[in-house]
Image (spheres, rainbow, N blue to C red):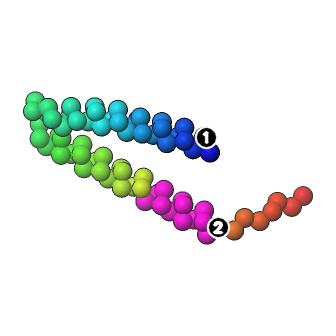
Amino acid sequence: MGRDIGIIILGTAILVLMGWGLRGFFADADIHLGLRVAVGAIGGGVLFLVVRLARARLTKAKTEKHKEVEK
């Protein structure tokens, strides 16, 4: 239980820091619009793949039957 809360807090802190950095990147007018769009598309694609992977693993973990290890 405590480990799960620690992972949630760490993940939230990482997301906040990434958001703060990306806000500056996307708001900077000196960076070409095409580069900002490309970075956003790549980031969105990576996020999509991570979410699909997490959902697939959770679904597999719920449906998988574990057998006892025999000696």
What residue appears at the point 60 percent right and 62 percent down from the top-left corner? 61
Q: Nearer the viewer, residue 34 or 53?
A: 53
Residues at marks 2 and 1, CA–CA distance in whole angstroms: 26 Å
Of labels 2 and 1, earlier in sequence is 1
* Left-right relation of 54 to 47: right
Few, some or many C-alpha atoms within 10 Å of disc 2 (few <14, some 14-19, many ≥20)?
few
Q: Quadrant of residue 5?
A: top right
- Element type at mark 1: helix
Residue in the image at 30% along x and 51% along y: 44
- For the view shown, which residue lies furthest in the right direction? 71
> Which secondary structure lies at badge 2?
loop
In the image: residue 35, left or right of residue 4:
left
**Which residue lies at the image location 62% right of the left edge and 45% below the top edge?**
1
Q: Quadrant of residue 38?
A: top left
What main secondary structure does the magenta stretch of the protein show?
A: helix
Question: x and y percent of residue 62 in the render?
Answer: 60, 66
On the image, the x and y values in percent for residue 63 come to: 61, 69
Q: Quadrant of the C terminus?
A: bottom right
Front residue of this view, candidates 1 and 33: 1
* Residue 15 vertical placement versus 64 (above, below): above
**53 magenta-colored:** yes
Residue type at mark 1: give it: Gly
Name the residue that disc number 1 marks: 2
> Which stretch is magenta?
52-63
Q: Position of residue 52 (x, y in %)?
A: 43, 59
Q: Residue 64 has which mark?
A: 2
Instruction: Residue 5: say if magenta.
Output: no
